[in-house]
Amino acid sequence: MAGETDVAEILKGVQSRIAEACAKAGRKPDEVEIIGVTKTHGPDVVREAWAAGIRRFGENKVQEAAWKIPESVSGPEWHLIGHLQRNKVRPALELFTVIHSVDSVRLLEQIERVAEEGGYRPEILLEINVAGEASKSGVSPAQAPEVVEYALGCRNVTLTGLMTLAPFCPDPELTRPVFAKLRGLRDRWESEFGIGLPNLSMGMSNDYLVAVEEGATWLRLGTVLFGDRPKRKPGADEAEERWEP
Ligand SMILES: *Cc1c(COP(=O)(O)O)cnc(C)c1O
């Protein structure tokens, strides 16, 4: 496990590479924020990262976040970056400020309903399956406008941008078209719907610099900051995921 100075030092290196990528693309480094992805790591890692200056954290499972968040530090903004089932919307809204993985009208309806009942004001992103991979979640670019439309009618939920999970490629250059396409869809829907969609959640450890060059505002970084993830038990389901490193 990384010691305190490790995360702080690694973060400095990552930030300077981000700054270089920004310079290359004519962007300002403060347009890009890191979301520290702490899935499978314990609250100690969250505390270290918080001490190093990370202010936003991402988890992909509601169940895991439910025990980890209260045991970490108070102060971070928590982002749900993994698939959300409709029956977990209520705990998700209790835990998370931003949900990156909205991918259907049905899910959005449920979020709006629970938010109305519970007085939550969640920020959401639409997860777009840009590459059309059958194995990935996310709404297709063709079906997304219907979800955008629905979001515009919501009183409690605010749509602020788009998210995508690029296919893993050993050569990050190969993911560039996916990021460029997400940005293009954002630009198009901003003008078609007359709205602002400032947040582009794209880029992970292996491809974040390319994502920065293509306009990412939120980088979801796990491995590059915190090292390899401990393996989950094969077949472990969420219910038994009281996860102790
Ligand atoms: C795990 C995960 C990440 C972080 O992946 P790394 O390659 O470790 O940076 C980013 N986004 C999502 C949706 C994830 O599930």
Image (cartoon, rainbow, N blue to C red):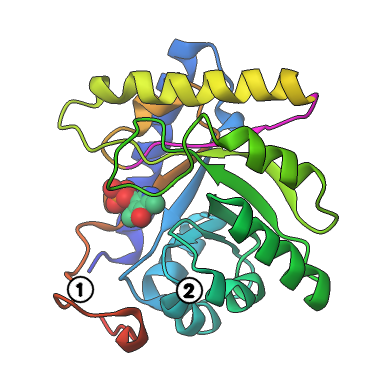
Residue 21 on image: x %, y %: 41, 21
Q: Main secondary structure of the magenta part?
A: loop
Residue 127 on image: x %, y %: 50, 44
Q: Dot 2: what SS?
A: helix
Residue count near mark 2 (Cα–Cα under 10 Å), binned few <14, some 14–19, many ≥20: many
Residue 144 on image: x %, y %: 57, 36
Query: Quick one: label 1 or label 2, which is nearer the N terminus?
Result: 2
Name the residue located 44 percent from the left edge and 55 percent from the top edge. Answer: 36
Question: What range is drawn magenta here?
Answer: 194-204
Residue 183 drawn in magenta:
no
Q: Dot 1: what SS?
A: loop
Direction from residue 124 to residue 239 in the image, left or right: left
- Marking on residue 62: 2
Direction from residue 50 to residue 113 in the image, left or right: right
Name above or below for residue 49 compared with residue 66. Answer: above
Name above or below for residue 26 compared with residue 206. Answer: above
Q: Quadrant of residue 94?
A: bottom right
Q: Quadrant of residue 27?
A: top right
Compare residues 107 and 43 and report the one nearer the observer: 107
